């Protein structure tokens, strides 16, 4: 038996001298208090109750620990959850007591507990518990000893459910419960349900892992569970409206049931959902009676004033209410059910339950509309001072145009360079831009951010007198528009002093260097681009330092463009990937800079012989650019799409798109490198299809800049000749690589395999740093066969040679080239020439009979009956 003196030493007991208790018995003068049956009876689960097996299982697992606390405010379904659990698991070992204010009398509390426990079937008729009666005096130690000892000898587990524990606020009953919990028998389990914090010393149990806690968040209804609840009430909502209702109620069971009742009564569903809480009488009555009625006037006013904000910190709450102890009050209110919950910890932020907030805000707007405006103004000023400008604009928009205009003039440019263009566009829509050139320039920049280039151009054309500050902004926006569309940039460099404008101006100067390089010599062009890359790196660093994420996007895109012109595909890929990732991180779904990055990645994929990736990036670029895509961009996308379709086997369609890209460029200015690249792609496609060489191509290229090496390469393709190693080619390693491949093919035809191997090895070394694979796919089939034959003998280039081989094999399979063997493919290409079978046999150093065998196999696989039909079929299939 436990000694009552042990309990007398408990820290919750007074320090009176211990003496044996006088324990009464049923029938003595000190009988137990009368306990209403409703207090000790497990509540009935209503017919409309929606079983939640996940919560039932959670509770079942939690009750394996000595104490379980279910904490949530009124209406979250605590009682129904516990009643459902008792019903599902059996009530023989469950004692239920619903507490009220009267239970702050220890005699009343323990009378009720003993009645509830003794009503359980697991308590034997001869148990000492039937005889115990709580004393009316303050000497509880002996009585509690008897209770613990009697519980300790029960034949099985006993679960004691105490509902509404928040009703216990006086020290005496709390001391008694704490004492029993402290000396709790092994088979005794307490399940405590409370609206607020349980005023019992449970920290020790929590540290020892002996306490299970189920917070309000676990009791919230999910969308699927809310659907079941409404269906049980005869209400059906589509998925979208259901999500809105769950979001507005925050999954609060009571609110969902009240909403179901309102919806069942009929009326427009959207109107009911929109007005629910602030205009629904039943919901308002429930909030007022169950949650707000116990608050003093000052606390209620405090909550109403902070209801203008989605979330508040102690500092913001202080600015709104003028209360220096706002943080203390916020922290205390987090224990008052769903009124406030902690939404962040560093520094602390608090969020009000959406229904409570809607109700209080509506009440404030009805009773003190001027106060609401003042609170929004204070919130706007606080957020602006904290640098949270999008929040400041949100509150300013609730007040008047003058406040919005003040914020726009102070912060709009910075917001746009950060990427918060949606906020600025909403503000501009409120105040308008008519007759104000500064606002017009801001609006033009906002248009550029979302790809509305036509709107931006129209705003930039509007002429009006400008002060120096407005003129600087106008010129920066106009220069940005020029870069995006390929128009000439201003000759005079800008030098504003504000950090964000200085970084912006530096990026514009770098773009001007790139543009001017087109008109310079090779050496000067290289120097100009190197300087441009350095300027862009400095501008980007400055933009990052000031949190200008959108300007970082500009700089990275411009860097990608410069590196693409230098055919530094690795650096280009990295810059483009960063641009696309940054846009995804900030949710920028339409952006001309991101569109340009996708287009550039498409070029990289094309040159690496990845047509599917090239097409995907071209599609993404078109989507991100929007309807106002400049012709120079359409040219770039036509280049990518045409080349990729050609490589994917759609040869004639690919050639058509390449020709269209060149034709639609008209007189638009684009870098000479892109001009040369599309010309090479088109010429190569025309030669491969056996079409006439495009006679106007050389003149078209020459009219747009100096590209002697590339023109010579085009001529060699058309004539079937070779090309000496070019000096200072425009496209750098790409043109040099193509020249080496021509040399290797010529060496094979001449029977000079040693020279062919040397030229092929040089070509691999040129291609490897930037992974240029596409030229190998378009090379002479005999050269591709040589690559296969020499695998294992390319030294340092061996890994890249194997990579090229795998890429070529994959491309052949994707186009159906696998129909023919490698040797049959070589013979097929030879058939496209005018040489006889004897001449082909001599070139290939095989017998005529061997060539004839290959020809018969080719005819059979292509379903052809003659040399001409075989060649035509092969071209249709993309085999030549």
Image (tube, grey):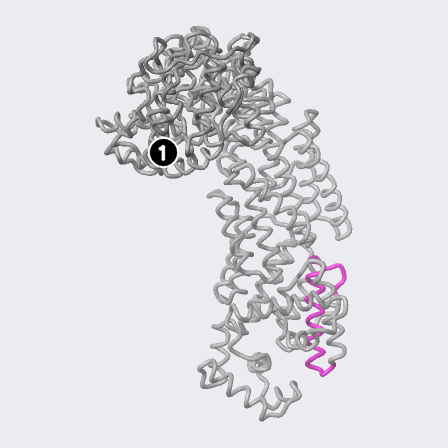
Residue 396 image position (x, y, % from top left):
49, 18
Task: Identify the secondary structure beneath mark 1.
Answer: helix
Residue 468 image position (x, y, % from top left):
64, 22
Q: Of residues 157 and 377, which is closer to you in this image?
A: 157
Is-magenta flag for residue 728? Answer: yes
Above or below: residue 762 compared with residue 367: below
- Residue depicted at x 63% and y 55%: 703
Magenta range: 726-752
The chief SS type of the magenta part is helix
Task: Tell me where residue 838 sits by quadrant.
Answer: bottom right
Q: Of residues 852 and 193, which is closer to you in this image?
A: 193
Residue 402 visible? The answer is: no
Residue 497 image position (x, y, % from top left):
70, 25
Q: Mark 1 points at which residue?
A: 85
Above or below: residue 323 compared with residue 120: above
The C terminus: image quadrant:
bottom right
Task: Tell me where residue 790 sits by quadrant.
Answer: bottom right
Q: Is residue 191 left or right of residue 849?
A: left
Q: In this view, does 880 lie to the left or right of 292?
A: right
- Residue depicted at x 74% and y 66%: 797
């Amino acid at each position: 038996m436990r000694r009552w003196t042990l309990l007398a030493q408990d820290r919750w007991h007074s320090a009176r001298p211990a003496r044996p208790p006088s324990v009464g018995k049923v029938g003595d003068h000190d009988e137990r208090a009368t306990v209403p049956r409703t207090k000790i009876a497990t509540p009935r689960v209503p017919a409309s109750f929606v079983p939640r097996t996940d919560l039932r299982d959670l509770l079942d697992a939690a009750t394996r620990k000595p104490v379980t606390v279910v904490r949530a405010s009124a209406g979250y379904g605590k009682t129904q959850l516990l009643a459902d659990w008792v019903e599902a698991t059996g009530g023989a070992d469950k004692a239920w007591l619903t507490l009220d204010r009267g239970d702050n009398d220890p005699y009343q509390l323990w009378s009720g507990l003993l009645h509830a426990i003794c009503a359980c079937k697991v308590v034997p008729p001869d148990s000492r518990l039937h005889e115990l009666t709580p004393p009316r005096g303050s000497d509880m130690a002996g009585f509690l000893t008897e209770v613990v000892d009697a519980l300790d000898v029960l034949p099985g587990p006993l679960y004691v459910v105490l509902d509404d524990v928040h009703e216990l606020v006086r020290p005496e009953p709390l001391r008694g419960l704490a004492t029993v919990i402290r000396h709790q028998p092994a088979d005794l389990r307490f399940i405590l349900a409370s609206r607020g914090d349980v005023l019992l010393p449970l920290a020790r149990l929590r540290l020892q892992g002996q306490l299970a806690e189920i917070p309000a968040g676990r009791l919230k209804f999910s969308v699927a569970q809310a659907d079941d609840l409404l269906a049980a009430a005869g209400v059906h909502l589509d998925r979208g409206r259901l999500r809105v209702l769950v979001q507005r109620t925050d999954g609060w069971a009571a609110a969902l049931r009240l909403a179901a009742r309102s919806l069942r009564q009929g009326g427009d569903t959207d109107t009911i959902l929109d007005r629910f809480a602030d205009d629904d009488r039943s919901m308002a009555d429930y909030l007022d009676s169950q949650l707000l009625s116990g608050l003093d006037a000052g606390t209620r006013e405090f909550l109403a004033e902070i209801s203008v904000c989605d979330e508040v910190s102690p500092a913001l709450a202080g600015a709104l209410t003028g209360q220096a102890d706002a943080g203390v009050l916020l922290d205390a209110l987090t224990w008052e059910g769903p009124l406030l919950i902690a939404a962040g910890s560093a520094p602390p932020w608090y969020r009000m339950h959406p229904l409570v907030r809607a109700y209080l805000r509506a009440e404030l707007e009805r009773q003190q509309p001027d106060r609401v405006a003042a609170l929004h103004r204070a919130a706007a000023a606080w957020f602006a001072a904290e640098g949270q400008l999008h929040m400041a604009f949100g509150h300013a928009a609730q007040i008047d145009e003058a406040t919005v205009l003040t914020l726009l003039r102070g912060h709009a440019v910075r917001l746009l360079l950060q990427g918060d263009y949606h906020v600025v566009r909403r503000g501009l829509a409120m105040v308008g831009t008519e007759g104000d050139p500064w606002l017009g320039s801001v609006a033009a920049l906002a248009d550029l951010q979302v790809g509305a280039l036509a709107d931006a151009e129209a705003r930039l054309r509007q002429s009006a007198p400008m002060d120096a500050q407005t003129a600087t902004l106008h010129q920066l926006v106009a220069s940005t528009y020029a870069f995006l569309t390929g128009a000439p940039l201003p000759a005079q460099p800008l030098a504003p002093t504000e950090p964000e404008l200085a970084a912006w101006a530096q990026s514009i100067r770098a773009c001007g260097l790139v543009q001017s390089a087109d008109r310079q010599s090779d050496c000067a062009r290289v120097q100009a681009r190197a300087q441009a890359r350095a300027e862009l790196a400095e501008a980007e660093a400055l933009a990052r330092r000031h949190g200008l994420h959108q300007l970082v996007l500009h700089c990275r895109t411009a860097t990608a463009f410069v590196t693409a012109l230098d055919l530094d595909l690795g650096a280009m890929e990295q810059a483009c990937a960063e641009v696309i990732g940054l846009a995804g991180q900030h949710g920028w779904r339409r952006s001309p800079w991101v569109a340009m990055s996708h287009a550039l990645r498409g070029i990289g994929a094309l040159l690496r012989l990845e047509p599917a990736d090239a097409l995907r990036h071209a599609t993404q670029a078109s989507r991100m650019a929007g309807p106002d895509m400049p012709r120079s961009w359409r040219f770039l996308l036509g280049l990518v799409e045409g080349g990729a379709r050609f490589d994917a086997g759609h040869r004639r369609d690919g050639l058509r798109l390449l020709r269209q890209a060149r034709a639609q460029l008209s007189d638009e200015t684009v870098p000479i490198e892109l001009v040369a690249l599309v010309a090479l792609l088109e010429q190569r496609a025309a030669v491969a299809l056996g079409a006439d060489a495009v006679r106007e191509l050389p003149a078209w290229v020459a009219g747009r800049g100096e590209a002697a090496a590339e023109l010579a390469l085009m001529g060699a393709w058309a004539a079937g000749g070779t090309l000496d190693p070019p000096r200072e080619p425009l496209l750098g390693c790409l043109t040099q690589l193509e020249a080496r491949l021509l040399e290797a093919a010529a060496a094979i035809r001449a029977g000079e395999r040693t020279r062919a191997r040397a030229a092929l090895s040089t070509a691999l070394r040129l291609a490897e740093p930037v992974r240029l694979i596409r030229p190998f796919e378009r090379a002479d089939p005999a050269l591709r066969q040589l690559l296969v034959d020499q695998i294992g003998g390319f030294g340092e280039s061996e890994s890249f040679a194997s990579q090229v081989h795998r890429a070529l094999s994959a491309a052949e399979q994707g186009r159906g080239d696998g129909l023919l063997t490698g040797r049959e493919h070589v013979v097929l290409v030879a058939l496209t020439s005018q040489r006889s079978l004897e001449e082909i046999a001599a070139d290939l150093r095989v017998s005529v009979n061997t060539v004839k065998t290959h020809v018969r196999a080719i005819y059979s696989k292509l379903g052809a009956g003659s040399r001409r039909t075989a060649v035509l079929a092969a071209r249709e299939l993309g085999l030549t």
